[in-house]
Image (cartoon, coloured by chain):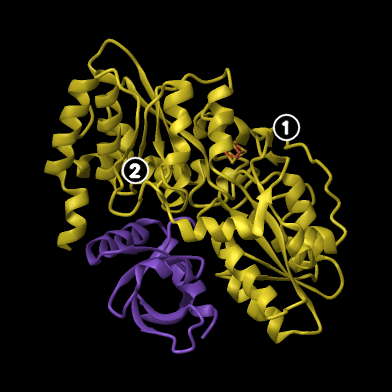
Amino acid sequence: MCLGIPGQLVELSADNDQLARVDVAGVRRMINIGLLEDEELAPGDWVLIHVGFAMSKIDEEEAAVALASLKLMGSGLEDEMEMLRGTIR
Amino acid sequence: MRFVDEYRDPVASRRVLARIVALAGTERHYKFMEVCGGHTHTIYRHGIEHVLPRNVELVHGPGCPVCVIPMGRIDDAIAVAETPGVIFTSFGDMMRVPGGRGTLLEAKARGSDVRFVYSPLDALKIAVDNPDREVVFFAVGFETTAPSTAVTLLKARADRVMNFSVFSNHVTIVPPVKAILESPDLRLDGFLGPGHVSTVVGNHPYRFVAQEYGLPLVTAGFEPLDILQAIEMLLTQISEGRCEIENQYTRIVRDEGNPRALQFLAEVFELRPHFEWRGLGFIAQSALKLRDEFAPWDAELRFAVPGVRVADPKACQCGEVLKGVIKPWECKVFGTACTPETPIGTCMVSSEGACAAYYNFGRLHREAAVSLGRASA
Ligand code: SF4
């Protein structure tokens, strides 16, 4: 819950509803990007996702580091991925 | 992976370790608290305690939100979950936390409709999809997750989703740090500041640590090298006679935090006068409740919540672990009666809890230490 998982923005929702499609280690889902509205996110950008919300804009390097950390967390990454897959589109 | 190697590079960590050894000298003992459970995890996972000089000690703090929820609140959650017609939603971690009447998972086995969700938005969606049911979201977490709950509530209000409510157990990071500084049990020399919480609150809220208590705090990232660098920065401050709030994790944390997230928090939540923390007791103004404007979405107002205080089991020493007074393995039931499969206390449940982190990785110390570049004798 606290560590966050990195994802790459694929497309912003056209409805102006603060949603965006991200790719998280090959899985695509919608997340909320309203907390980063001031960052003017664009497709290709990386973000750190906590409980379905983009919390920080990060660079590709940080994304790789964060993913590697999660992989080391025992079942951390699998649990996150399972949750990601299980819910919302 | 080029990027990652940088943060696990034995040569780099050896270099930082050498500076730590030189700065620490042999004269005195240093005790630093890492506030955040994510740090505790890194420290055990990579055997960091094992490579530090003996006189530099890390103690674990209260920064795992699953760990600090008291038993009574779990019982409250179960009471709401057992209300006919309710769909009770929770993060997976909370499902196995024992209260006085067992866990949410056991309530589910008894027939309550308890579902785990990845995001509060998923809980809101369940409410939209089930208009004839009451959907309650069990909100936990520090300022890292509280803004997400706030945005979800704003959306529930905007879309008039009236069969959705939140059982708020959000807590704030500064009051427990203050409580620990006020506690006579522990003498600290500085703090590793939490990484992700600080992306929201920034570094300014910690200034009292330096100003009122004369101690340094360095906000740190989650890689082994991050932690080592932060320790080096703490020791540097001390050796130069400074005590300041510094930021090692500038890759992500800005001094002012995330103003938008803070604004959402202020719009939806207000401070509770008191909240009970597991092991730390009641701490004033340390948790968030919904503002009056959000009363229709406040599960505490909409459901009969017993609100009974439940004492921790006698054998459980989570309080001392959360305050950094004892190490996980010093608890009498650690690894015997209390394991990740059959947790007695909360610190054994979440992978960020100190006991679970030590249980899973403590034995890897030596191996991990070697990979960091300094096998200990
Ligand atoms: S071993 Fe179990 S009971 Fe003891 S402090 Fe850790 S989590 Fe609590």
Q: Does the residue labelled 1 lie within 8 Å of ligand 1?
A: no
Residue B319: tell me if it is visible: yes
| Residue B83 drawn above or below residue B199 | below
Chain B colour? yellow
**Disc 2 and disc 1 on one polypeptide chain:** yes
| Disc on the earlier residue, 2 or 1 | 2
Q: Does the residue labelled 2 lie within 8 Å of ligand 1?
A: no
- Kindly identify which residue carries mark 2: B220
B12 vs B154, nearest the viewer = B154
Is B118 on the left-hand or right-hand side of A61? right
Amino acid at dot 1:
Lys
| Residue B231 drawn above or below residue B77 | above
- Kindly identify which residue carries mark 1: B314
Tell me the element at label 2: loop
| Residue A50 drawn above or below residue B219 | below
Report x, y in % for residue B85. Answer: 84, 76
Report x, y in % for residue A16. Answer: 48, 84
At a point 35% along the width and 62% down the height, the residue shown is A71
Residue B360: tell me if it is visible: no
Chain A colour? purple
| Residue B171 drawn above or below residue B319 | below
At a point 40% along the width and 22% down the height, the residue shown is B189
In which chain is the residue bearing label 2?
A: B
At a point 62% along the width and 33% down the height, the residue shown is B319
